[in-house]
Structure formats: structure tokens, C-alpha cells
Amino acid sequence: MSGERTSWLADTIRRHKSGDAVGVYSVCSAHPTVVEAAIVQAAADDSPVLIEATSNQVDQYGGYTGMRPAEFRDLVLGIADRCGFPRNRVVLGGDHLGPNRWQGETADTAMEKADALIAAYVEAGYAKIHLDCSMSCADDPAVLDDETVAQRTARLLHVAEQSAQRGGAGLPMYVIGTEVPVPGGAHETLGVLTPTPADRAQRTIDAHRAAFTSSGLDHVWPRVMALVVQPGVEFDHLQVIDYRRNATEGLRRVLDDEAHLVFEAHSTDYQRPTQLRELVEDHWAVLKVGPGLTFAMREALFALAHIENQLVPQQSRSDLIEVVERRMLANPQYWQAYYNGDPQTQQTARRYSYSDRLRYYWADDEVDAARRHLLDNLDRVGIPLPLVSQFLPHQYDRVRAGELDLTANALVIDRIRDAMRPYARACLTENNTTGDDR
């Protein structure tokens, strides 16, 4: 099933390595509205779409979304069907697959669970697998050496290959790397960010190649498509560290002699369009984006909540913003360790920070009910154009131009696409994307 999907990834990597500055952006979100926006954007660009679930979101126990890999696959494909988007153009990936979820347990226990995690993803037909064994477990030293990471990665690779053959799925493509940014952005306030040194990136490649060979998996090496290194991009709660290409000149040359390897850039959320294009040109041919998309979704939904306040009697409102705040306070596990300061500072961070810890709460039953109530209210009463202009000016322009339907969900989808459009322009050539503001 995943064979033709991996062929798109392989072809993109081949074109990039031959000198065509193309790339792939990966939508790392499990929210159905973000998934729909990604599929709508891909349809507009006449391109396949790459959607990845992280090990936090989706695992063999359900993750924080409550979905296992096969269930998330079915969700995505169901949305594609509803949008009239061909299933064979949907590429699924698994991000940070390894012992990440079980770092508080011993390495033996965590790796056993990681084995099962990998098997569940591959057997469900995921075509792009990020093997991430970079984190220490309870009985590990604070920092793992490359050899240990590579040996654990080879173990998971063996499981993945066996699972693909057992499940009859196509053979996946893989991503490796030991300098892996924290999923979802930095916890602490950032200062200067130094890209991965070239010699360290080379040691990572050498250690993994040696571990694969010693495990009898050297034949899989050509399907290792990307290496995760730090290009010097990141975000925290209040700031974004922008890419500086003059700081990566040595690092870029590490892949000159690797026929099938490009870099994968994590935490590219909120990078400006120029920096995204420079990253692709500089061989970060896979760009990951996640919190930036739910950030845009939150902006749209909060804007609609303000519109609702103008149009709907108080007793009939969704009170979405208040419901979100109440649920975040009642269940603080996803933000409390991240947002410091006085109560007002914490509230501002809960609602507006770049790290977007709010994204963990959209699946909450009360929050989701309030979201649906909001959309229903606005579609029932109708949204006057002047209020769209006030709160969602880019969407207003598209409605006026006849390019966008004036429904609440369409406005949300299009606002999320505003965060995706720069990625499409950065990754796709002029021949297969419009590059416009549709």
C-alpha cells in the first residue's frame, strides 16, 4: 500500500540531490481540521500530502488523542475521501518513534514498548518512519553516545522491516538523527542557537551506517532518506529563532557524498517565507510544521468567538475562549511545567504562546463541543462581511474575490492554510504549485 507513496518521497529526494531545489513539508498534527486544511492545500497545489503523527499524539495505547496508528490512518483517509482527494496521494509518517513516551522507565522496558510502537505504525501502512532513540531512559546516562543511539535505532529498524514484510505493506523510508529538537518546541527561553557541527553530523551518519551493517541491515541504507540535525531554528513561548544560512555552510557539505540523504528540519514553525526557501535550497528538503498550524487554527477560532460575541445573545453563545481556559485550568498537565510567571502571564501564555500548549486541549469533549457550537451559531446567523474584515482580513479579501465560501469552517480552514502556503511555495517548483494566495 505504501509503495507508490514512498516513490513520491524518493523521487523528491532524487530531484533534490540532482540539483533541483525541491522539498517536502510535513504536517505534524492530529487535529481533523488541520488535516483537512492540509488536504485542501495539497489539492490546490496538485501535490501529494505528507501528514505525520507523533509518538505523543498516536501510539499503540492511544496517545493523548486516543488514537492508535490504524485509527489515525482511517481518520486521515476518511477526510481525504470527504474532500475528494485520492487516497494514493496521502502519505503518512510517524514522528519521534522510539522510547520517547517511556523515558521514565528502564531502557529495556521502554525499548520493548518502542518495538510495539514501530510495528503498529508500519503495519498500518505508514510510509515514512522517523526512528528516534536520542532520548535517555531512567537507567541511562544523561546523554547517550552515538553508538548506543545507533544500535537502538538498528533494533527498531529490524522491527520495522519485519513488520512491513509481515503486513504486506510497501517498505518504508526512514529518518535518523541524534540531534533531535524537543517535540513541539523548546521548554525554556531560548538564547543563541548553534547549528549542529559538521563533524558531529558526520559521526551520526557513520555510527548509524555501521550499526545497520553489523545488524545485517546495510541493504536498507538507501531507504534512509533524511538526517535530523539542528539548522539553528527553533521557537519558545514568546520568540522565534530564525534560520541564518551563513551559520550552516560547513554542515551543508556533510551530505555531498551521500547519494540519497537530505536533511530534515524540525521546529520550522513560524519561520518567515524567505527562511523556509533558504532551508530547502540548503538541503533541508524536509520541513516539519505542527504547532504553527494549530496556532493559526486557534487564531481563527478565537476571532470567530469575538464575532460571535457581536452577533449571538449571551445565553446562546459557545463561550469557546472561556471553556478552553476552564478546561486548561482543570487539567493543567500539558502546560503547567512550561508556563511560569504570575497568573496573568500564565493566562497569556496559555492562550497565545508560540509553543501552543493549548493544542493538547482541542480533543477535550467540552472544548470540542464549544468549538462545534461556535461554528453552528455563526453559520445559523450568518457572518457579516465587515466583521470578517475586522477579525480575519486575509479571509475577507478572498471572500470578496469569490475564492472562499463565507462559512465558519471555511474561514478556519483558510486561516490554517495561511500558515501552510509559505511551505508550499518553499518546497514545490513553479510547475506543480500555483504559489498564489488561494
Image (cartoon, rainbow, N blue to C red):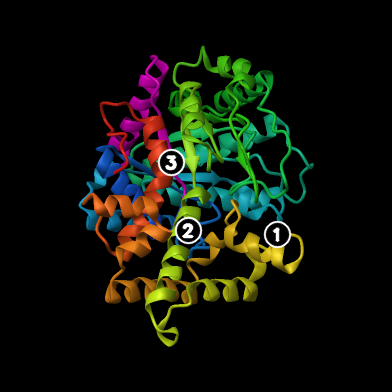
Measuring from the top left, give residue 227's x and y in whole percent. Answer: 54, 29
Closer to the eye: label 2 or 3: 2
Element at label 2: helix
Element at label 3: strand
Determine the residue positioned at 58% across, 46% down.
Answer: 98
Neighbourhood count class around disc 2 (C-alpha, 10 Å): few under 14, some 14–19, many 20 upward: some
Q: Which residue is mark 2?
A: 299
Measuring from the top left, give residue 414's x and y in whole percent. Answer: 34, 52
Q: Which residue is mark 1?
A: 339
Name the outermost residue toward the bottom. Answer: 315
Q: Which residue is mark 3?
A: 26
Q: Nearer the viewer, residue 196 or 422?
A: 422
The residue stretch that appears in magenta: 1-28
Q: Nearer the viewer, residue 91 or 358?
A: 358
Residue 277 falls inside the magenta stretch: no
Quarter of the image where the N terminus is located: top left
Element at label 1: loop
First in sequence, mark 3 or 1: give its number.
3
The CA span between labels 1 and 2 is 19 Å
In the image, is residue 336 above or below residue 154? Answer: below
